[in-house]
Amino acid sequence: MTRRYNPRNHDAHPPHFTQGYKSSITRSPQHKLIRLEGAVGEVTGPVFGHNDIEANDNNLLVNYATAGEGPIGERIILHGHILDESARPVPNTLVEIWQANAGGRYRHKNDSYLAPIDPNFGGCGRTVTDENGRYSFHTVKPGAYPWQNHENSWRPAHIHVSVFGSAFCQRLITQCYFEGDPLIPICPIVQTIPDPAAIDRLIARLDLDATIPFDSVAYRFDVVLRGQISTPFENRAEGN
């Protein structure tokens, strides 16, 4: 079966350089990009298999915690589908996440925010989509944190999401935010995206149907890999 190719809507995605986003001033290219063709090794491997995923890799509530203990914070489920441009599921795809803890601090040596490190929270997980393109993570809702864009600049609560294709060079990275967060409209990074509909595609929605009563609130975040309504990807601003 053949399907119509839906080209990307470039007007919905952020430019490399945005004056209000301080880091883009020094990190964005100022000259025309040079395209480099991938070599055979980059296209064909290395790849991940199901045997590389352990039972609790997608459960951040236990994968770093001491036995019998757990991280502090609001317990949540982040789940959704990985889809192609025609809304078809993409199975057997590696999905990774990383995030700050409930206080807004990453477990990273360069993070000096005054919020404490949670000894029972590593902040990262991985899973492989099933035959219907579905993925799921158990974690805690990350906290907002300050950053040095200007003197009172705060990042909304967010989780970084990485989706791999069949090789390392086929990797897309984005961030998902949470419905109702008042910091989203004033975040300089979010505001690099010119299309409000594209910003909306980065927001995980409350999903009561997937919530576990007296345990965890669920949020749904679908990732569309390409096409007119593709998810904005921070590492593929030139096109996907």
Image (cartoon, rainbow, N blue to C red):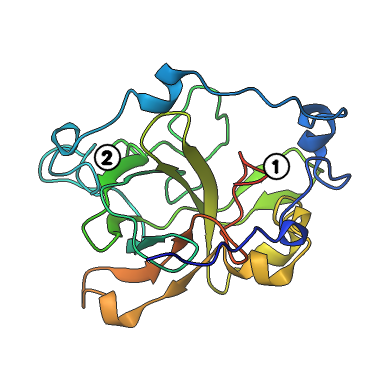
Left or right of 117, for residue 20: right
What x and y, as percent, mark residue 151? 81, 43
Q: Residue at x 74, y 49 (%)?
A: 153
Which callout, 2 or 1, points at the residue further toward the start of the chain?
Answer: 2
At label 2, counting other C-alpha atoms closer than 10 Å, the crowd grade (few under 14, some 14-19, many 20 or more) is some
Displayed quadrant of residue 164: top left
C-alpha distance separating marks 2 and 1: 38 Å
Indicate the secondary structure of the residue bearing disc 1.
loop
For this rendering, which residue is in front, 86 or 22? 86
Q: Residue at x 87, y 27 (%)?
A: 31
Which residue matches tag 1? 238
Q: Quadrant where the N terminus lies?
A: bottom left
Name the amino acid, label 2.
Answer: Asn
Residue 62 picture location, percent across and down? 19, 45
| On screen, residue 67 above or below 42 | below
Q: How many marks?
A: 2
Residue annotated with mark 2: 120
Left or right relative to 48: residue 163: right
Which disc, if any, is residue 82?
A: none
Of tags 2 and 1, which is closer to the observer? Answer: 1
In screen coordinates, is 233 left or right of 99? right
Q: Observer-nearest residue: 135 or 106? A: 135
In the drawing, does residue 199 fall left or right of residue 217? right
What residue appears at the point 44 percent right and 60 percent down from the top-left corner?
Answer: 84
Tell me residue 58's x, y (percent): 25, 47
Q: Position of residue 100 (x, y in %)?
A: 46, 44
Say what secondary structure mark 2 lies in. Answer: loop
Asked if the residue under mark 1 is in contact with the one under mark 2, i.e. CB atoms within 8 Å, the reply is no
Residue 182 visible from this viewpoint:
no
| Three-letter residue code for mark 1 | Glu
